[in-house]
Structure formats: structure tokens, C-alpha cells
Image (tube, helix red, strand yellow):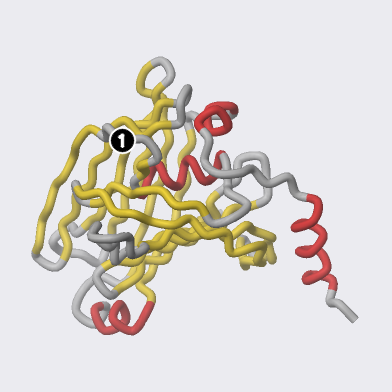
Amino acid sequence: MVRRPRLFLLLLAALCCWAGPLHAADAASSPAVGERFHYRWHLTRLGGFLAGLFFPDEGDGVLTVEPTREGVLASELLITSEQSRANDYFRYGSEVDTRTGRTLRAWSSYQWRGETKNKSGEVAREQVVDIASGIYLLRRNPPKEPVEMEIWSDGKIYPVRVVPRGFEFQHHAGASQATRHLAIEGIHRGSERFWKGSLDLWLALDDRATPVQITISRRGAGVQLELVP
């Protein structure tokens, strides 16, 4: 006998209307503006646990989406920690043309473990996302099958693949919530650079495709952000 939660997920998989690859027209059809999501984060994976013995291992995250001018919005993810005496942080941001779905400009900066770096630049190629615009576009148009694209990361562009992981239940706000799991991972393609990071999203099955959980991995550690009710 199939358990009810599992049956519910199977029904969702059969009945939910999934979009195809990240087409610009679909991304522009229902732009999100004036959004602000608050998260608590903690380090994941063994490397992250060991790092937490000497560095911040939990803190706050804020994901914002705001209009900047006609047809353009800015999305930014800021990760901080009250444990950090050095005010360590990660910031990922981008501008997206809501009419075409293109990432126009991207920036990233961080101060972590005594290292500081700032990168920003125009994005001249299509089908390129960064962490922030990737979250926005996947919320607007989750693919139904793996699709290859590129990601801007710290000023460099890498080939990646967006992989639908199916429907999963996440514990949120004291209840079990059905979500759609999507992942962006690096791929080996010829002589191009390989992205050693990863991005996982768990999106609520609501009108906003609310990002209930976000996991960003890089440099041997992962930061898992969970939505604050």
C-alpha cells in the first residue's frame, strides 16, 4: 500500500504543469517584485562542521528582489553571521531584464576566513545566470528535464546543468510542506573551466514558488538556508 505523502507526490508529478527550459518569455510573464525572504543558515558537510569549530557556523540570510528601473529588477542574497567578529559575509547579486529573462549584470563579494574578494561585471552572453538570478529564473520557470546553461561565479563563466530532483517534503514552520527540488551543478565540457560549487533549491508549490530552503556549496563546505516563518 502506498503511503499518503508518497501518493500525494506522485499525483503532483502527474498533474503539475511543468515548464520547459528557461525561456525568456516564460521568465518575464510573472516577474516577482518587492520580495524579501529571511533565513537562518548553518554549515553542512564534514568540512563545514570542522570549520565551524573556528569560524561562524550559523547566521542569517536575506534574499531580496526589487525593481530598479523599467523592465529590470535586482536580486540579491546576503549571508551574514552574528558570530563573526570580523563581520564575515557573502553577497551574490544580479540585474535581470524581465522582458527577455537575461542576466544583465552580476556581482559577488565576500569576506570569509580572513580573505576578501569583490567581483562585478556585465554579462554579455545569453543563458548565463549567477546565484541570485538563477534562483529568480528557476522560480519563474523550473525545467522538467536536465538542461545545460552557464553560471557567472566570481567573474568567471562555467558550464553547468540544472537538474530537476522531483518533489520532496520539507519540514517548515512546524509542518511538512511539499516542495520542488532543483539543483545546479558543474559539468565537464571540453577545456572549459569546471565549477566546483553547487546550488540546490527547494521551492514551495505556491504561486510565488517560495524558496523554502537554499543550499550553496563551495570550497568544501555548504551553507544551508532555511526560511524563517
Q: Quadrant of residue 220?
A: bottom left
Residue 84 drawn at (x, y percent): 20, 64
Q: Residue at x 14, y 47 (%)?
A: 118
Along the horizontal axis of the image, is 137 left or right of 29?
A: left
Helix, strand or loop at label 1? It is loop
Along the horizontal axis of the image, is 178 left or right of 213?
A: right
Residue 175 seen in render: yes
- Please, which residue is most extreme toward the front here? 190
**How many residues crowd around disc 1 within 10 Å: few (fewer than 14), some, or many (20 or more)?**
few
Quarter of the picture containing the C terminus is: bottom right
Residue 105 drawn at (x, y percent): 27, 33
Q: Residue at x 38, y 69 (%)?
A: 42
Which residue is labeled 1 in the image? 125
Residue 40 seen in render: no
Quarter of the picture containing the N terminus is: bottom right
- Please, which residue is most extreme toward the right here? 1
Q: Residue at x 39, y 31 (%)?
A: 96
Out of 189 and 45, give the one closest to the viewer: 189
Residue 217 drawn at (x, y percent): 34, 66
Going by the numbered disc 1, the residue's amino acid type is Arg
Q: Is residue 196 above or below residue 26?
A: below
Out of 188 and 32, give the one closest to the viewer: 188
Residue 20 drawn at (x, y percent): 61, 44
Q: Quadrant of residue 51?
A: bottom left
